[in-house]
Amino acid sequence: MSGDDTQALWAAFRQTGDQGARDRLILTYAPLVKYVAGRLGAGLPAHVEESDLVSYGLIGLIGAIERFDPAREIKFETFAISRIRGAIIDELRALDWVPRSVRSRAREIERAIGQFEAQHHRAPTDEEIATKLELTGDELEASLDEISRSSIVALDELWTMSSSGDEISLIDTIEDHDSADPQRNLTEAELREAIAEAIANLPEREKIVVTLYYYEELTLREIGDVLGVTESRVSQLHTKAILRLRGHLAGGSTALGRG
């Protein structure tokens, strides 16, 4: 479908609420759902079916189409992806498939990192995290493995509130949404600065994983090829990086953990 055809569909839907136009817009942008579901599914347990993620994501796509305002000059793809991702995560949380013990241990690690950074003004090593939690190094490694297998540990889960009261995923603040709202631009600029600083303070290999996964959009397997390690090792590095970022941001009262 050409750009002119798509614009005509948007005009028809906005002006008359034509359901046929809405349905054609859903079909046009359905590949976005497949893309987001595939990205999220790469880090989830094998029993979570990608087809289920696509179903959850379609709800987010439909909501995005119904709420999108072309007059704001924001790319629909950017607007929709965050809502598709949010719909999938919301549904997975509602299913409560992550064991409570795993969530609890993840929060303990986040708090330990945040407290250490507040006291020492630097990121803790794995050994320092383990000591603070009264764990052995092997026990910490086992916990990280369990968290990476069982939980959606990603920048998608770092949330803050916009000035208008809407929830914003911090991963979305990495990108420029070309928003026309000056106050929103200011808020997101502050968030971008905070998360960029947190990423800069990560240990080198964790920084590489975050950069390649979120900025270059490589898969965990592709990152493993770059680093010369296994996919499971990359998953663990990713988990540690995100827990460090969440601990850092929560310690600075920049963001709130959702859920």
Image (cartoon, grey):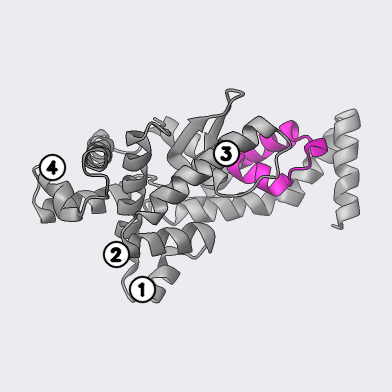
- The image shows residue 14, relative to residue 132, as above or below, that is above
Query: How far across and down, in percent of the image, does residue 80 sit?
Result: 66, 43
The Cα atoms of the two marked residues, 2 and 3, are separated by 32 Å
* Badge 1 amino acid: Leu
Residue in the image at 76% along x and 51% along y:
28
- The mark nearer the N terminus, 2 or 4, is 4
Position of the C terminus, as image quadrant, is: top left
Q: Is residue 132 left or right of residue 115?
A: left
The Cα atoms of the two marked residues, 4 and 3, are separated by 33 Å
Q: Give the dominant element type of the magenta stretch: helix, strand or loop.
A: helix
Between disc 2 and disc 1, the foreground one is 1
- The mark nearer the N terminus, 4 or 3, is 4
Name the residue tied to disc 2. Answer: 233
Span colored in magenta: 56-83
The answer to whether any part of residue 34 appears in the image is yes
* Badge 2 amino acid: Arg
Q: How many marks?
A: 4
* Badge 3 amino acid: Glu
Name the residue tied to disc 1. Answer: 227
**Residue 26 occupies quadrant:** top right
Q: Is residue 147 left or right of residue 134?
A: right
Name the residue tied to disc 3. Answer: 188
Membership of 96 in magenta stretch: no
For the residues labelled 2 and 1, say whether their Cβ atoms are less than 8 Å apart.
yes
- The image shows residue 199, relative to residue 225, as above or below, that is above
- The mark nearer the N terminus, 1 or 4, is 4
Between disc 1 and disc 4, the foreground one is 4
- The mark nearer the N terminus, 2 or 1, is 1
Q: Is residue 142 left or right of residue 5?
A: left
- The mark nearer the N terminus, 2 or 3, is 3
